[in-house]
Image: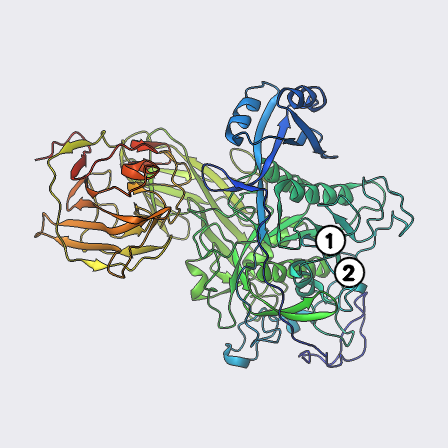
Amino acid sequence: MALALTANTACTDDGSLAQPIPAATTTNTSPPTTAQRPDEIRKDAHGREYVSGQLIVRYKKDRAKDVGKTLSAQHRAEVIHAYRTTPDVQVLRYNDRRNIEEVMESIQKDSEVLYAEPNYVLYASDLVPNDPSFNQLWGLDNKGATGGLTDADINAPEAWEYTIGSSANVIAIIDTGIDYNHPDLATNMWINPGEIAGNGVDDDNNGYIDDIHGINAITNSGDPMDDNNHGTHCAGTIAGRGNNGTGVVGVSWTTKLMACKFLNASGNGSTADAIKCLDYFHVMRTRAQHPAPIVATSNSWGGSGFSQALYDGIKQHMSDGMLFIAAAGNNARNTDSTPYYPSSYDSPNIISVAASTSNDTLASFSNHGRSVHIAAPGEAIYSTLRNGDYGNLSGTSMAAPHVSGLAALLKAQDPHRDWRQIKNLILTGGQRKPAFINTTTTGRRIRAWDVDGVGSLSCVGQVLNTRVKPTGRLISWSANQPLNLAVYNIQCDSPMGAPTVVVSGTSNTSILLSDTGTNGDLAADDGLYFGQFTPTTHGTYTLTFPDGETVTLNVAQPYYPPVKVGFSYRSIVGTNLNLWDDSTATINPGFPIYFASTAPVSSMVHVSMNGLVTLETPVSSFSNTPLPNNTYQELIAPFWDDLYPGATSADNVYWAVIGAAPSRELVIEWRNVYHYGSRTDPMTFQVIFYEERPDIRINYKDVSTANAAFDYGASATVGVQTSPVHATQFSNNTPSLTNNTSYVWLYCGECFP
């Protein structure tokens, strides 16, 4: 494809003017499909995948050597890796099939251990089918080709009039490696000035031999050659060489690329190896001799497991002055309720990126939510592949490199900018679009340059004043529990001053937020302001944020334990929600729900195939847990388990409103649905909400599955959660239910008639 520029000249490696850019010749190939997962992967009690027989352990300061040796002997384990810059963290491997929760619990009893956690499995984030009909770089300059929307792009050619990047800066890619011999990448590869290529010696004493372009964390070697395509594709979007008459051009033409390979040829890897990459980049960024000028790391990977060790490593990068740009994930889920790590960590140096389409809509596969910062082009992105090839990939994996390239341009435009200023310019300079207003924090898609002060490189007077925490509009909470409040208040790259959140309702007060790096604020002067509100009495509160947006805070006591009442099943025809495996649907019953309150709190109800009902954010998780679960606000769980539609299209989840106002009932029925693990005997049960009453009724018509492992709630959670810290659980993974029975969950001591 020929590059479209608004000027007839380009620039050389140092930014000076050069000759016009010739047309680039490309070929289009399809990347390989993702291979099967490794054999040694298991799931914990919550369904999160981890490397079998491995734990990441952090000891108290300077205790790793002695305590680690003792623990290794005690648990028949060996230390397989210790990190150079965080010697208190070790990776242990135990060589039997013991339950990982038991081993963790035993190790954490040692007073010298800070934490032990599984070595969670992480995956590349581009698990979406490729679309070969898009074969041009629409994300940089969209001319409306093949049905795209003209100007639904980042305006890269306009930005290149300001800067094409600088070889003085580095973007580090944590991924499957990079084909550092690719003709569009080779001249932009970082070269380690402290290492002599090919001499078989660790010249710079950093633990890796011949790490000329980076490392392979899997093999502990200095060769990060890509054997998958994923990392090479990301590299081309960030910094494919410009003005070389070959292939594509990246967002930043001349920025240097450093690689850490931790994802294997199948596109998966472990948390422990990801931390090795963070460890390596920390060493290279902060070493006294030849420090690498890393602006940001680009991270197009993730998973569902929270790792304290990985989180600690990301925060260390913040202290080092590096941004951590992360793909939001491709599960089409709201990460406010279903986090995707590392993009969902709250470290201030993270930018979480959703994927936009060539029509400026949110890609159908993209994760979203208040916890996702901004969108960037991520569908059918054309870039470099291994062995000198080119092709299309889709995913938030492709969106994050656009942001990484923009970070490089901003650093090149003004070398004095720190990570705070670069992040703020990326967020405030974005172009506000309807598709992203309710799906990202900023409501914007990145824009490198624009008119009227919009654009990261051309930002003038652009303000971002928006709520970050709490993420939801309806919050179920408990008295005397502090609620974290956070607001972005930025103009272009600078904080705008402390905003106020006004509390009204049961009590009235004002909360002045601060950006001082204390009291829950992890970084001072970054424009993200923090505070807390601790309700002391039950009732309903309204929190009004500086931009006028309101959040309802419902502070309630838990429900009483359920009362068994006479079986009275509601026979309904109902509306079929046509749910599929792990899917959700939203219904409007026509009257407000009085959940855990003597006042209405919601007009909408979210229903999951997996036997769950929520009011604020849909929850589709098949992996039930004990209640309360602090990941979620409120949960009504008549039968939370891994459920599946029945044998016919009529066997699904239905809803109906019966009766007359003001005594109507909302009936939600799981009708002839299966347990996923035993699809022979269907189950039928229903949950009922009352108009103008907070009580909840659950009717169990048939909860037998013809399999003792799942019968009568043997693998389910039954209960009602009113806040992240309070719930009334009836049972968890216990066969506590029987057919033709009814229970009523009473609130505020009401007696059921």
- Whether residue 435 sits left or right of residue 106 in the image: it is left
Mark 1 falls on what kind of element?
Answer: strand
Three-letter residue code for mark 2 = Tyr
What is the CA distance from the residue labelled 1 to the residue labelled 2? 9 Å
Q: Which residue is mark 1?
A: 259
Residue in front for this viewpoint, 504 or 54: 54
The mark found on residue 180 in the picture is 2
Mark 2 falls on what kind of element?
Answer: loop
The mark found on residue 20 in the picture is none
Residue in front for this viewpoint, 613 or 684: 684
- Whether residue 616 sits left or right of residue 518 in the image: it is left
- Whether residue 559 sits left or right of residue 240 in the image: it is left
- Residue 279 visible in this rendered orientation of the protein: yes
Q: Are marks 1 and 2 in contact (CB under 8 Å)?
A: yes
Kindly indicate the quadrant of the structure image that contains residue 708: top left
- Whether residue 502 sits left or right of residue 383 in the image: it is left
- Residue 385 vs 231, above or below: the answer is below
Figure disc tally: 2
Q: Which residue is located at x 87 percent, y 48 percent?
A: 195
Q: Which residue is located at x 58 percent, y 45 percent?
A: 39
Three-letter residue code for mark 1 = Ala
